[in-house]
Amino acid sequence: MTSKDGFSWTKADGLRPGIPCIGAIQPSSNIKSTDTEFDVIVVGAGYAGLTAARDTSVAAFSGLKVLLLEARDRIGGRSWSSNIGGYPYEMGGTWVYWGQATIWREIARYGMQDELESSYDFSRGINRFLLASAEGTQSFTHDEENVLMQKCLSKFFNVDGKDGRDALPMPHSAHLTPSDRRFDNMSVADRLVEIQHNLTPNERLCVEGFVLLCSGATLATTSFYEMLHWWALSGHTYEGCINHLVRFKFRGGQSSFAVRFFEEALATGNLSYALSQPVASVEDSAHRITVTTRSGQAFTAKYMISAMPLNVLSNVAFNPPLKEGKATAAKIGHVNQTIKVHAEILDRDLRSFTGISYPHNGLIYGFGDGETPAGNTHVVAFGGQHKHFHPEDDINRTISEFQGFTPMNVERVVFHNWSRDEFAKGAWFFPAPGLLASHFEELRARQGNIFFASSDWASGWRSFIDGAIEEGTRAAANVRADMIGQSKN
Amino acid sequence: MTSKDGFSWTKADGLRPGIPCIGAIQPSSNIKSTDTEFDVIVVGAGYAGLTAARDTSVAAFSGLKVLLLEARDRIGGRSWSSNIGGYPYEMGGTWVYWGQATIWREIARYGMQDELESSYDFSRGINRFLLASAEGTQSFTHDEENVLMQKCLSKFFNVDGKDGRDALPMPHSAHLTPSDRRFDNMSVADRLVEIQHNLTPNERLCVEGFVLLCSGATLATTSFYEMLHWWALSGHTYEGCINHLVRFKFRGGQSSFAVRFFEEALATGNLSYALSQPVASVEDSAHRITVTTRSGQAFTAKYMISAMPLNVLSNVAFNPPLKEGKATAAKIGHVNQTIKVHAEILDRDLRSFTGISYPHNGLIYGFGDGETPAGNTHVVAFGGQHKHFHPEDDINRTISEFQGFTPMNVERVVFHNWSRDEFAKGAWFFPAPGLLASHFEELRARQGNIFFASSDWASGWRSFIDGAIEEGTRAAANVRADMIGQSKN
């Protein structure tokens, strides 16, 4: 099946919207026309919604009826795999790791531990780290890259003489400490001012390139706390960051994992679902929640789990409206406008390169991510609000941004423009200074019988698939707890 | 409630068997006399059995009836918390970490992320690492300890020029590679011969002390592969080992976590259980499994999940008998005979010490693990087959073994002798060379409708609570898959 989402370009076909995708769901709905009443309605079929739908479906309450509504023509939300000749370019979330507890538990549960492969293959050709700045390109071994990155990140996060270990010892806590809030009210730009005399020019390039890869924002709009949180989650080392953030991916694509959740839920016989059904409004009155789609269909349930991202919460008309703190946070939104672009290139010698091209280039961070069925090299590259561009607006510019790392012969370009996606309005969650300090607890709070599940406000791996599963689990558990509580009354 | 398990000693009361325990289950059984037929019988209420019982109980098969049989008067198996004036001395498994995916996912699921505390408090008194050998005691800062330990372990595991990173890149794989098997046929003693000229005397003491802490065996009976596996699971660094193995524990005791599994299963209404009911025999015939307890009660079910440790599998008469590979492995058993002893000591100054006392001392590894309600220091210490002793046989000797680290005033001793425990016959799983290379797959295999779940043959955190949950999950999933398969026929 081809999704409406995403773009691909080749010299022969030019730029085309819509890409074949792995894990498409057929038929697009299984709702019977008489089915309008449910126990739980889950809105959004990203990992948070998929997990919530699965966990409520399999719950031991006989007769629990679950409806899953999804705006897009596919599951996976901000994470999905294209399928180009069987090769899964990852349009959103890609990498997973056994140090990410929530997702790894699911990978083990589905017996998929051996379906991972490393993105890196440091064995051939230009087996180097290329650091391209306005002044020219320097070349390092990957061992030198590791030393340089560890050094600059250690300086950047060393707010306590312990590389951040004392400042953020328990990164999975569901509560922000006063120290967390202080760091959240600080931007990365603020932090760089503190240490500017302690960084070499290369260290400064590397730390800024790394931060912007993580946040997809600018130095001024990136919360220092959130970066410190990623660092702590990764075990306070650069090696930990690489392992947790960008090393291992599914050989069969991220979507090969997402469909497992969906299929398990479906197998219970308790799940109804409909794709391509964006929700227009949610009305909560008289102990019933009515969810109405843009197409005018209305469904009711006792509970709703909203599994929509922060930046699109305002798309839906809630009545009564979202409580003030949540509404304010939704209005502020998060700042990640990552550009993620894949290129299939003829240069086999570039399989082993990694690179930062900054601050002059639109794509900041790139590396060899795989070998395509044709034997070409697959390069993935990232940009963001720093020199933002829309890849589909000028494909020649997009191709030339890849040259910012090193010359390469681009045969194919594949991407999803998350910034123009009305159901995402950005990539993974990344907060500007102050958002979490002011609104974290409010984002996580229920409102009546509506529970809010999104990776955007997970307590652990916030912004990651891991955090989405954490949140879907939390919402399903809350529904169950509520039902048990009520059944006792 | 007081368990029959464990011993405590104080000057006033002397040595006493049985210790109050957290998470006791009352009543000890809920089986109705007419209840003899079940869908699934789970034997063993350690974490593997608890998880299996929970996951089959909550499964969406209406009417699924689960029976959980446990030999002891408490749940938790080789992991349980005493309760001495509200203070939870941990008799078995203690530490957990968010890098251990399976257990962390459950901790998050039960919302217990903020119920952890660090065992270490490096803030006061004798804030030192004491390295006691036959020649005397050296004293180091904890920073020096970290450098020394990282150095010696890096040499020990550096079989590939990458500190083991290339030798064991995917430690959660469910399959052993030829390289894994080669390292498994090698003992730690063999490995030490290879690097003996490259170790300083202190490095040698530290690496041997650390290995024996992990294996509870001797250098000759400790599989080098299994140590390498722990190292890889921990991220190939000493800091990773400390984080994963001995840093964070439940403020309310490990048992406060175990009871959550039990309570969730019970709340489904599908769970029958009986404590203090050791199983004598298992008969599998005519598509029914009959489980008979030592007290002569017989129960039948379509499926059984054996959640007993390797070393006690031979306690039960299976008919037909266990298949050859599994039977052979059960006969060989694992080699971990760890002695774990707690002392409450008057010396507040020792809260921050860590120590290795080796090779002359019976307790090899010890450190300040907490502060008791009386304001005293809680020290935990470990020995094993190297200079093995039974702590209850000569309590004065046991107390004097603590002095092997540094002089201390022992007020109370608490421990569980796992070596003489007929339902454990040892501590956490640790294999001698060759066991996994020859029998790993066979240990994991089903036999008819009997599934075998134990941390002892987990693919990831084998020997850990994390691995037990991994295995309980696998068994429950296998039962469900089997039922779905059959329901299609």
Image (cartoon, coloured by chain):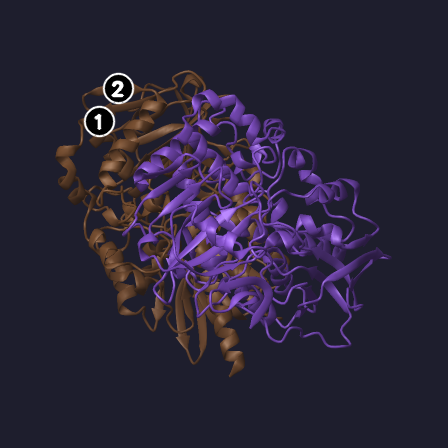
Chain colours: A purple, B brown
Q: In this rendering, is residue B299 above or below A425?
A: below
Callout 2: chain: B
The residue at which mark 1 appears reads as: B202
Residue drawn at (52%, 60%), measured in percent from left and top? Answer: B53
- Observer-nearest of B419 and B377: B377
Residue B330 spot, x, y in % from top left: 29, 59
What is the three-letter code of the residue carrying label 1?
Asn
Residue A29 tag number: none
What is the three-letter code of the residue carrying label 2?
Gln
Mark 1 residue element: helix
Residue A413 spot, x, y in % from top left: 48, 59
On the picture, is A392 further left or further right than A357? Answer: right
Residue B226 visible at all: yes
Considering only order in the chain, which callout, 2 or 1, is on the residue closer to the N terminus?
2
On the picture, is A362 further left or further right than B415? Answer: right
Residue B82 visible at all: no
Residue B138 tag number: 2
Callout 1: chain: B
Q: In this rendering, is residue A124 above or below B8?
A: below
Residue drawn at (40%, 74%), measured in percent from left and top? Answer: B284
Discs 1, 2 touching: Cβ within 8 Å: yes
Residue B134 spot, x, y in % from top left: 19, 24
Mark 2 residue element: strand
Residue A429, by quadrant, is top right
Residue drawn at (46%, 40%), measured in percent from left and top? Answer: A234
Labels 1 and 2 positioned on one and the same chain:
yes
Quadrant placement of the N terminus of chain B:
top right
On the picture, is B272 further left or further right than B91? Answer: right
Residue A100 spot, x, y in % from top left: 48, 48
- Observer-nearest of A188 and A451: A188
* Residue farthest to the bottom, as pictured: B489
Residue drawn at (54%, 60%), measured in percent from left and top? Answer: A80
